[in-house]
Image (cartoon, rainbow, N blue to C red):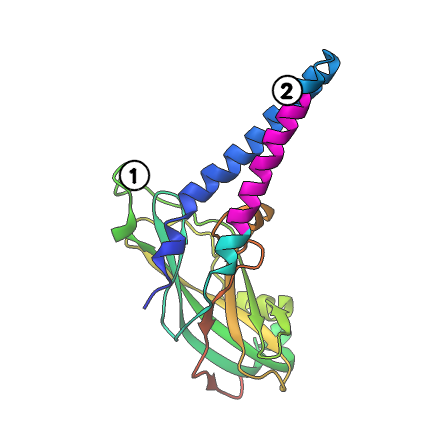
């Protein structure tokens, strides 16, 4: 199972639309300033109207697609796709462990509640490569942000102390490691959740302010999310 390709296919047009909007606003501002300096108020007012109409149209498209988007919950092993313009990277949860402690010796840490150790698989889907991309060209995935969200809405970032303990065990692999088409690897992410956190789910998103302003993208304002379910996690005493 994978996330909806309709939103994925909007990625390239969304980038172009954002770039066009930024360029258009910048050009409009220049024209307005020049017109005002030349005392061409009619031109300045007309360009301001054009710029305002463009902004309105963009906002309608931005919030409209977000309003009609649908929330998805992918089961354990289900793949969530991210567009890299000319290809796609798929992420899925391979396994989940719940532990009270992580690490050994000096690197040993105890959870304030309970550590959820997520084994996240990153896969370069070779079937999504565009015709213009070389079949053996490596790709560095874009920056991602992972957060665990409980049923009551509380959010929990990746635990720094747990990450250090996993690193001491040699279990940390960077999420941005380059891949070639068809390649995959796993990364371990650890979250410290309180014992009263019910039905937590993983939210993996692209990282960057610009994604908030891209039409049809998950990070855009009011857009529904695609979650990665954790069930059924395995509870063990320690690691």
76, above or below 234, in the image: above
Whole-percent x, y for residue 53 in the image: 58, 36
Q: Is residue 169 visible?
A: no
Q: Residues within 10 Å of mark 2 (few under 14, many from 20)?
A: some
Label 2 to label 1, Cα distance in Å? 38 Å
What x and y, as percent, mark residue 90?
Answer: 37, 59
Residue at mark 1: 133
Residue drawn at the location 54% of the way across and 42% of the way down: 58
Q: Residue at x 63, y 24 (%)?
A: 46
Identity of the residue drawn at 57% across and 79% down: 151
User: Is residue 139 located in the magenta-colored stretch of the structure?
Assistant: no
Helix, strand or loop at mark 1: loop
- Asked if residue 231 lies left or right of residue 114, the reply is left
In the image, the segment drawn in magenta is: 44-62
Q: Which residue is mark 2?
A: 31
The picture places residue 109, in percent across and down from the top left corner, at 63, 76
Q: Residue at x 25, y 52 (%)?
A: 127
Horizontal side of residue 36 vs 200, given as left or right = right
For label 1, count other residues whose C-alpha is less than 10 Å away and answer few (under 14), some (14-19) or many (20+). few
- Of residues 131 and 13, the one drawn nearer to the viewer in this rendering: 13
In the current view of this chain or complex, which residue is farthest to the top?
Answer: 38
């Amino acid at each position: 199972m994978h996330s909806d390709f309709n939103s994925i296919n909007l990625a390239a047009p969304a980038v172009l639309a954002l770039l066009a909007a930024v360029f258009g606003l910048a050009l409009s501002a220049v024209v307005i300033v020049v017109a005002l300096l030349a005392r061409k108020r009619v031109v300045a007012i007309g360009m301001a109207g054009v710029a305002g109409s463009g902004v309105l149209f963009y906002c309608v498209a931005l919030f409209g697609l977000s309003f009609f988007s649908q929330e998805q919950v992918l089961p354990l092993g289900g793949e969530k796709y991210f567009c890299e313009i000319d290809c796609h990277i798929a992420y899925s949860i391979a396994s989940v462990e719940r532990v009270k402690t992580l690490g050994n010796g000096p690197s040993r840490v105890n959870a304030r509640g309970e550590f959820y150790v997520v084994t996240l698989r990153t896969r370069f889907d070779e079937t999504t490569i565009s015709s213009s991309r070389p079949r053996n060209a490596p790709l560095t995935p874009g920056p991602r942000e992972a957060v665990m969200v409980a049923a009551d809405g509380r959010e929990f970032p990746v635990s720094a102390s747990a990450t250090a303990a996993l690193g001491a065990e040699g279990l940390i692999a960077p999420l941005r490691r380059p891949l070639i088409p068809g390649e995959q690897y796993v990364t371990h992410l650890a979250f410290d959740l309180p014992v009263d956190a019910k039905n937590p789910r993983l939210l993996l998103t692209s990282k960057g302010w610009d994604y908030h302003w891209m039409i049809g993208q998950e990070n855009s304002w009011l857009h529904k999310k695609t979650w990665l379910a954790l069930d059924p996690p395995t509870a063990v005493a320690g690691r």
